[in-house]
Image: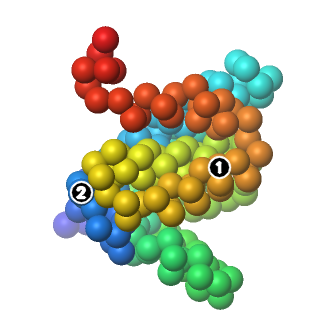
Amino acid sequence: MNQEGKFFALLSRMKYIRRWGLMRNTRQENLAEHSLETAYIAHAIALIHNRRCGGQADIGRVISLALYHDAAEILTGDMPTPVKYKNNEIRTAYKAVEQAAAVQMLSFLPEDLQPDYRPLLVAEGDGIEARIVKAADKLSALVKCLEEQQAGNHEFEHALKAQAFAIKEMNLPAAEIFMDRFLEAYRMNLDELSE
């Protein structure tokens, strides 16, 4: 098979990449479901940013960035947060590994499509769209922590506090509005949600 035909088959393997590897989970979360949840949270944050905070985020770009934000982990695996952020040397080295994986993934696309996917796979800048996706990524992690807490798993309590703090530190009003308005519903069961 031709090298440039592998990209989408590789993406479909997101479902095999488990997250939260160092934590005891009541339910495993995979990269595909995390990416989808990050995308719809990012979409909501972008809308809030534009409608309520006077912003001009490119909604399509936000959604696209969110869908591919962790795609390199298909090749690298999910690096646990305590390891990934232990110090600047490890963080810098891991960023380089992620960039190399993203470039390798690009090579699995036909050449004429590579320029369209490069800005989605290879981190470039920290504009408002990237900041929104980063906040959505943290909110998705926060949701996972809430779900584990609801299931009686205290393993995620520190992670829950850390994610909430990190979101506040981002100083992105739309993300805080999302937290204030929508986060409490994640604590409800199906009967409560459907009333």
Total marks placed = 2
Q: Mark 1 to mark 2: distance in Å?
A: 24 Å
Is there any visible trace of residue 2 in the rendered image?
yes
Instruction: Report the quarter where the C terminus lies.
Output: top left
Q: Nearer the viewer, residue 30 or 178?
A: 178
Q: Is residue 33 left or right of residue 71?
A: left
Give the labeled residue for mark 2: 26
Q: Which secondary structure, mark 2?
A: loop
The residue positioned 67% from the left and 36% from the top of the image is 176
Mark toward the start of the polypeptide (1 vs 2): 2
Instruction: Report the quarter where the N terminus lies.
Output: bottom left
Q: Nearer the viewer, residue 131 or 86?
A: 86
The residue positioned 46% from the left and 59% from the top of the image is 157
Residue type at mark 2: give it: Thr
Q: Is residue 10 left or right of residue 174?
A: left
Q: Which mark is residue 1?
A: none
Q: Which mark is residue 167?
A: 1
Q: Which secondary structure, mark 1?
A: helix
Residue type at mark 1: give it: Ile
Crowding around mark 2 (Cα neighbors within 10 Å: few <14, some 14 to 19, many 20+) is few
Q: Nearer the viewer, residue 144 or 71?
A: 144
